[in-house]
Amino acid sequence: MITRLSAAEISQQLKSKQVSAVEVTTEFLNRIESQDSLYGAFLAVDREKALAEAEAAQASIDAGTAGPLTGVPIAVKDNISTLGIETTCASKILKGYIPPYDATVVRQLKEAGAVILGKTNLDEFAMGSSTETSAYKLSHNPWDLTRTPGGSSGGSAAAVAAELAPLALGSDTGGSIRLPASFCGLVGFKPTYGRSSRYGLVAFASSLDQIGPLAKTVEDAALLASVTSGHCDLDATSIKAPAISTEKLKSGTLKGLKLAFPKEMFGEGTDPEVRKATEAALDALRKEGATVDEISIPTIPLGVTTYYIIAPAEASSNLGRFDGVRYGFRSEGQGHIDVVAKSRALGFGHEVKSRIMIGTYALSAGYYDAFYIKAQQVRAQMTQQFLDAFADYDFVVSPTAPVTAFQLGELSQDPMAMKLLDYCTIPANMGGMPAISVPIGFANNLPVGIHLMAGPMRDEELLAASFAVESLFQVEPKRPNIA
Ligand code: GLN
């Protein structure tokens, strides 16, 4: 069955003409149509566009000009702009908004001959960790439909784990690619800040946001990252560096790797089963010849509180553009101010409004120094402490999340517990460092991932090491028990 294969395997079959690009795309479209009511992964699917792209891809395969993703279908998180396809950020305020342009990553995908299947569900404006703040629907974890796939890229994770797409793009501001990857038994990679263009990604917290892949394998994640990276003139924070290379991906070895495990990464809320699985994984890495030293990074426990000043502050400014006039939803009202006020009151959901208020508060006169400046100081200090660790170690390891996938609804009344899910992933966003979640097995009968972080611009080394980590943990069963 084509839908079970990895992107690399599909690409192989396309090149050897065992299957055509239109057949591949049709298989996935049919599976979405018949199965996605179970998972709630997609917000929009454009069958005609996808099939047209598949036909163009086949022409390139026939002409011998195909690249590694030519003809490979991909799902795209719905906060990434797609020309001619509604882009809602799972918010009512963007209902009906059809971007007049493609995000750079989407343009790169199209130029590489990939096929865009559709847009995936997310927490509204990527604010959340369970995809439950979506204004449109719930997404379900393919390993257990009563549980969350994680968030905010929950639709992308559910799509890949349920075999509705071989690959997906997500975005990660505090862990939104890596957390759902860990909950759904996938690989989730956040590149170095600035390596993937943010042009066309609807901004949440611009200094933290980064686009990246969710995939079944490290190889697939690396392929997608290689196509969706490289300098972009339209993003002022884009790094002037070549695209991420996959050349040395398979040469990674565990022998001699110097890993640091910050003891603060086992925070208070760590599930004992996750702790056990992580410790067993670290032991397995040691057996392969890696060294794992316990170190201390004292600012780690400050990450979540710091993030919840900086991210809302940036969000309150970024979301100012949604005024009911320029995009999507618009309420009637008495004059301009009333229209704007009512459009925002009706268009945004509860989580988004609370972040806008927190952010506005943190930036207001009198509180700016006490909150925003203070948070920036902690951020700088935390980044420095990690950079110091990277002077002595190749990678920093930890669990990806303190827990495994929880029941839908379980944490809705406990915003603090929800926010603590990003405890281990936030530092990578704070310092712009590349980080990845790789499946290591199961805890509580649910998938669990290990988190590896590297110094800035060491994306290639991180992916190569992850490739070796993945080969060490031959996770069985590889796929959920799905139809
Ligand atoms: N869970 C975090 C939040 O709610 C991170 C989200 C993200 O990475 N987009 O803000």
Image (tube, grey):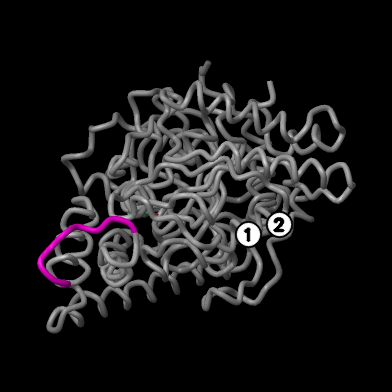
Q: Amino acid at mark 1?
A: Arg
Q: Residue at x 28, y 44 (%)?
A: 135
- Of 93 and 210, which appears nearest the observer? 93
User: In the rendering, which numbered label is found on residue 472?
Assistant: none
Query: Does the magenta portion include 333?
Result: yes
Badge 2 residue CB within 8 Å of ligand 1:
no
Q: Which quadrant holds residue 141? A: top left
Label 2: how many Cα within 10 Å (few below 14, some 14–19, many 20+):
some
Quarter of the view holding residue 271: top left
Q: Secondary structure at mark 2?
A: helix
To which residue does mark 2 refer?
A: 111
Residue 338 point in image, percent of width and height:
12, 67
The N terminus sits in image quarter: top right
Span shown in magenta: 328-336
Q: Is residue 414 visible?
A: yes
Q: Is residue 424 left or right of residue 186?
A: left
Q: Is residue 428 visible?
A: no
Query: Is the stretch drawn in magenta largely helix, strand or loop?
Result: loop
Q: Which quadrant of the picture is home to ligand 1?
A: bottom left
The percent position of residue 199, horizontal first and vertical second, equals 52, 67
Instruction: Provide the secondary structure element on which disc 1 rests.
Output: helix
The reply to whether the magenta stretch includes residue 378 is no
**Residue 107: mark in rendering:** 1
Residue 96 percent coordinates (x, y): 37, 51
Which residue corresponds to the image point at 41% horizontal and 42% vertical from the top-left?
Answer: 121
